[in-house]
Amino acid sequence: MRAAAALAAFLLASPALAFDTTKLGQRGSLFLDDIWPLIQQSSELKAEVDKALAELNKKSENIICHGMRFPGPWKHLGGERVAPYRCEFGERELEILTTARVTSRRGKVFDRPSSTAMHRARNVTETNPKWKWLK
C-alpha cells in the first residue's frame, strides 16, 4: 500500500503530467468570476482576492482577466481559457499560475500541443494555484 501511494505521489508530481499552457500562443479575456473555482482552491488566494475586491468596491464579475486560450483547431477545447491568468484590479494586476492537466476521454494525458492532442483532448483541469501581485 505504501509503495502504491509513493508511486501515485510521484506520478502526480511528474512534469510529464503538466501541460505547458504558454505554448498555446493565444490569449483571451474572461471575468474573474470564470476562474472563481480555481481561486477557491487556496484559502489564502481567496482571502487576498476578497480583500482586493473590497478595497475597489467591486464584484468578481466586474474584474477583467486574460488567460491563454486553446485555439480553434482544438476540436473539443477550442476557446477554453487556462493559466497563466492576469486580472486587473485597478492599478494592480494579479497573476495566477497553475498546474494544468489535459486529458482525453479515456484519461490519456497530453503534456504539449500536438495534432493528436488537438483531436483527442477533452478535459483540462487546473490545480495548485500560485500567484503574485504586479505593480
Image: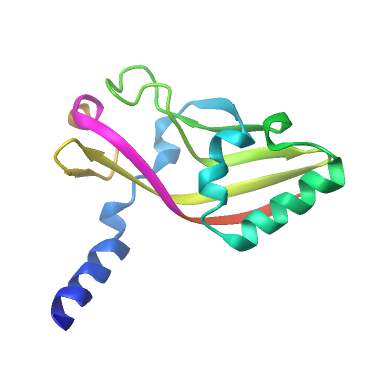
Apparent side of residue 110 relative to residue 97 in the rendered image (left or right):
left
Residue 41 appears anywhere in the view: yes
| For residue 60, above or below residue 14 | above
Q: Residue furthest bottom?
A: 2
Apparent side of residue 43 relative to residue 120 in the rendered image (left or right):
right
- Colouring used for the render: rainbow
Q: Quadrant of the N terminus?
A: bottom left
Residue 91: % across, % down? 83, 40
Residue 118 part of the magenta segment: yes
Apparent side of residue 85 relative to residue 82 in the rendered image (left or right):
right
Residue 13: % across, % down? 31, 64
What residue is rendered at 30% in x and 36% in y?
123
Q: Residue furthest top?
A: 72
| For residue 51, above or below residue 1 | above
Residue 108 part of the magenta segment: no
Apparent side of residue 40 relative to residue 71 in the rendered image (left or right):
right
What residue is rendered at 60% in x and 32% in y?
66
Q: Report the predominant secondary structure element of the magenta stretch.
A: strand
Instruction: Report the number of numbered marks.
Output: 0
Residue 135 appears anywhere in the view: no
For the record, the magenta segment spans 117-127
Residue 33: % across, % down? 61, 35
What residue is rendered at 16% in x and 43% in y?
108
| For residue 128, above or below residue 69 | below
Residue 25: % across, % down? 45, 29
What residue is rendered at 55% in x and 39% in y?
35
